[in-house]
Image (cartoon, helix red, strand yellow):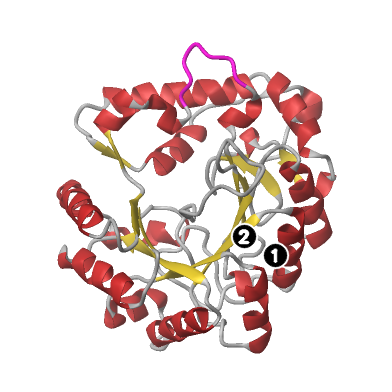
């Protein structure tokens, strides 16, 4: 299972999109060939829930018309979604930049290789050296399978990178990861902190301490400068000073009235079809709707602006000031904090007719 993070890329914005990226994360299934100990969505083999491809394409087409231009397919394991190739093909034809995150184990199958024709960027999950990776993934072949996937991506001349879950591990792991990324010719190394969500709630031993987080943060800046001409290094952690100097980084727009899309630069379609702001796991009371309703995004945004947007803006603002008030903390996993905050508040302004049923 992949980490709860957004796959990024450093290519120029797709033509016709002058305002940069608007991203839609798609989680089409929880079915997975592995049962990883840190999985935030509790994906596992045999979970059959999957999104309807026609509903999904209808929504993505309408979202493209509103300026969304990148899809990031995750899971579960994307290659276990039966309509993955069709999803990516239709998305490319619409005009999307397409990316996916995979554990790599199923890429050698011919049908999955053929899917690469419609993928712009692939991230392969790497949890550390071979023994550590295999232990976390619960499969003695997982690391070798990931390396085999990398060789296939090279063969197909695909842009690829690695995504790593930072956890309670030796500090020299970061040096190893950077060398690993460099030696395999990857263009991206994304570091995402462990989150106590899904199956991760039973893996508290993987939680980073405050001291470890600081040390990794310092090392990240060292390696980012060292490898600035080699690959893109990203850490999904914000420093308190960044929150102070650049509040817009966390969707905070004080005293500004902007279109709903500005507060929804990233949308998530979860495994049940709910359209969520921010990150997987967000409270579904804040959902824009569900793709099976077959309503265009323009319509959903109009309703959302009237009924829920003020609550969402207030959530962002409250969470922002709450983090600043927590003077004992200097480094924040913002995505995790905002998700947690979403479950502490109640949507007040939605009408009875448009309430989204919560499924916990």
Magenta stretch: give its range: 252-258
Classify 60 as above or below 172: above
Which residue does the numbered mark 2 point to in the structure image? Answer: 98
Residue that lies at the very extreme toward the top in this rendered image: 255
Residue 288 figure quarter: top right
Q: Residue at 30%, 71% (x, y): give it.
A: 182
Secondary structure beneath disc 2?
A: strand
- Residue for point 74% across, 49% down: 60
| Residue 12, position as x, y percentages in the image | 52, 50
103 horizontally vs 26: left or right: left
The quadrant holding residue 175 is bottom left
Residue 205 visible to an observer of this rendering: yes
Contact, mark 2 vs mark 1 (Cβ under 8 Å) = yes
Q: Residue at x 25, y 54 (%)?
A: 224
When asked about the image quadrant of residue 319, the answer is top left
Q: Is residue 168 magenta?
A: no
Q: In this view, does 179 lie above or below 189?
A: below
For residue 150, above or below residue 17: below
Q: In this view, does 94 lie to the left or right of 102?
A: right
Q: Nearer the viewer, residue 341 or 63?
A: 63
Element at label 1: helix
**Residue 88: which disc?**
1
Left or right placement of residue 192 versus residue 49 in this view: left
């Amino acid at each position: 299972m992949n980490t709860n993070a957004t796959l990024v890329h450093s290519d120029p914005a797709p033509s016709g999109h002058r305002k940069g990226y608007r991203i839609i994360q798609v989680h089409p299934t929880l079915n997975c060939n592995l049962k990883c100990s840190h999985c935030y969505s509790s994906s596992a083999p045999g979970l059959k829930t999957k999104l309807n491809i026609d509903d999904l394409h209808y929504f993505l087409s309408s979202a493209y018309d509103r300026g969304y231009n990148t899809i990031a397919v995750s899971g579960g394991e994307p290659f276990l979604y039966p309509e993955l190739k069709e999803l990516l093909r239709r998305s490319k034809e619409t005009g999307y930049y397409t990316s996916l995150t995979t554990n790599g184990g199923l890429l050698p199958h011919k049908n999955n290789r053929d899917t690469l024709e419609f993928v712009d960027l692939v991230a392969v999950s790497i949890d550390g050296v071979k023994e550590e990776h295999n232990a976390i993934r619960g499969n003695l072949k997982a690391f070798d399978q990931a390396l085999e996937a990398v060789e296939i991506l090279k063969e197909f001349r695909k842009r690829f990178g690695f995504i790593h879950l930072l956890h309670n591990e030796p500090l020299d792991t970061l040096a190893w990861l950077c060398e690993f990324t460099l030696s395999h010719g990857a263009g991206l190394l994304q570091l995402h902190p462990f989150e106590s969500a899904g199956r991760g709630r039973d893996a508290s031993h993987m939680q980073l301490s405050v001291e470890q987080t600081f040390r990794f943060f310092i090392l990240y800046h060292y390696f980012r400068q060292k490898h600035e001409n080699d690959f893109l290094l990203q850490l999904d952690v914000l420093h308190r000073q960044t929150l102070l100097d650049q509040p817009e980084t966390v969707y905070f727009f004080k005293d500004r009235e902007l279109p709903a899309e500005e507060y929804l630069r990233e949308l998530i379609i979860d495994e049940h079809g709910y359209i969520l702001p921010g990150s997987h796991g967000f409270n579904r009371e804040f959902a824009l709707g569900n793709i099976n309703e077959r309503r265009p995004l323009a319509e959903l945004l109009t309703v959302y602006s009237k009924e829920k947007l003020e609550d969402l803006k207030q959530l962002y603002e409250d969470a922002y000031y709450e983090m600043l008030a927590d003077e004992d903390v200097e480094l924040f996993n913002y995505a995790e904090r905002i998700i947690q905050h979403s479950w502490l508040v109640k949507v007040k302004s939605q009408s009875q007719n448009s309430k989204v049923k919560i499924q916990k």
